[in-house]
Image (cartoon, rainbow, N blue to C red):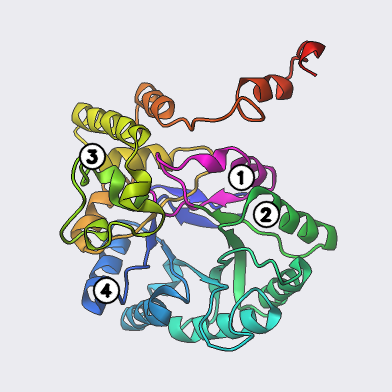
Amino acid sequence: MEYRLLGRSGLAVSRLCLGTMTFGSETDRAGAFDQLDTFVAAGGSFIDTADVYSKGVSEEIIGAWLADRPGVRDQLVIATKGRFPMAAHANGAGLSRRHLGDALNASLRRLGVETVDLYQMHSWDPLTPIEEYLRFIDDAVSAGKVHYFGLSNFTGWQLTAVAERARAHGWTAPVSLQPQYNLLTRYIELEITAAAGEYGLGLIPWSPLAGGWLTGKYSRDQLPTGATRLGENPARGMEGYDRRNTGRTWAVLDVVRELAAETGLSMAQVSLAWLADRPLVTAPIVGARTTEQLQGSLAVAEVHLDPALTARLDEVSRPELPDYPYGAMGTDQRSRVLPSPAGG
């Protein structure tokens, strides 16, 4: 397993991150233990969870696994998140000092650890002042409860505001961003990746296989059925069948399928390898229902696509954009060569 530094920090993590959202829901305790053992045996060190995953059960399973394997904690980087409701009262959600204090302490108890290596704000909170949660994080770092902090699902201007406030006050700054990013969802490249790069945030992409679409398991002419996420619920979230069943999706999948045949990799492995080597990406989050699925992802731990193959994927998955501000006209205006004044 290759290792990389997380953003501009000195924290070394494995090239793949184990996502544990399925633990306690789609994956039982025994299956979760097996996945964790398999990941660590393959050289993986980076484990991501959140308090809301199975309402705390995911963290509890990881904590039980850690307790059952003395000594393994020291070699791991454990990341969790706080922001969403875990209690039905007015202060049971958000990024307030009150809620984050409760959430972090509860996560530490469930995980059975004294310190979380990476504590992430799970989403933007429009009600809480940025200074409030930055002071909380700074205090948590000083108290030894958190080593580093990151953001999840923040837009470009939001992460810029957080990074600038932290810089201005000398408080602990974020080192990472966890966004959705894959061959079918590249819109973070318009603003978010530039902002992340400016402030030294490493990307930890979630949904690297677009909810299963990039595995090739779905058909353009048949509604999903069976024991898959869309088979059980075709309208599921952002990867819902009607949302993703477009000409662009099938064009991308056709090229992924071609490259899989040329390289001997699976479609999922081609897609993961492409993402793992995108600029600023530290470690895609690979989640699985079963150990067999996880092993397929781990096979990509040291795979790098030929640049010519990467270029084919870049071209077919390039987002369709308006001329301004992201298309040709906008690009000309932002280029290092000044355009003709005729453009306005």
Amino acid carrying label 3: it is: Arg
Q: Nearer the viewer, residue 252 or 242?
A: 242
Q: Earlier in the sequence, mark 3 or mark 4?
A: 4
The numbered mark at residue 159 is 2
Q: Earlier in the sequence, mark 2 or mark 4?
A: 4
21 over 181 or under it: above or below: below
One can see residue 209 in this view: no
Residue farthest to the left, as pictured: 226
Q: List the residue tagged with mark 3.
A: 220
**Which residue is found at the position 21% from the left and 63% from the top?**
290
Quadrant in which the C terminus is drawn: top right
Whether residue 88 appears in magenta in the rendering, the answer is no
What residue is rendered at 21% in x and 58% in y?
Answer: 231
Q: Which mark is residue 192?
A: 1
Secondary element at tag 4: helix
Q: CA distance from mark 2 to mark 4?
A: 35 Å
Left or right, 177 with respect to 239, comes to right
Q: Which circle marks residue 33 in the picture?
A: 4
Helix, strand or loop at mark 1: helix
Residue 189 belongs to the span the image colors magenta: yes
N-term mark: 1 or 4: 4
For badge 2, the amino acid type reads Leu
221 vs 100, left or right, is left
Front residue of 296/316: it is: 316
Q: CA distance from mark 3 to mark 4?
A: 36 Å
Earlier in the chain: of badge 2 and badge 3, it is: 2
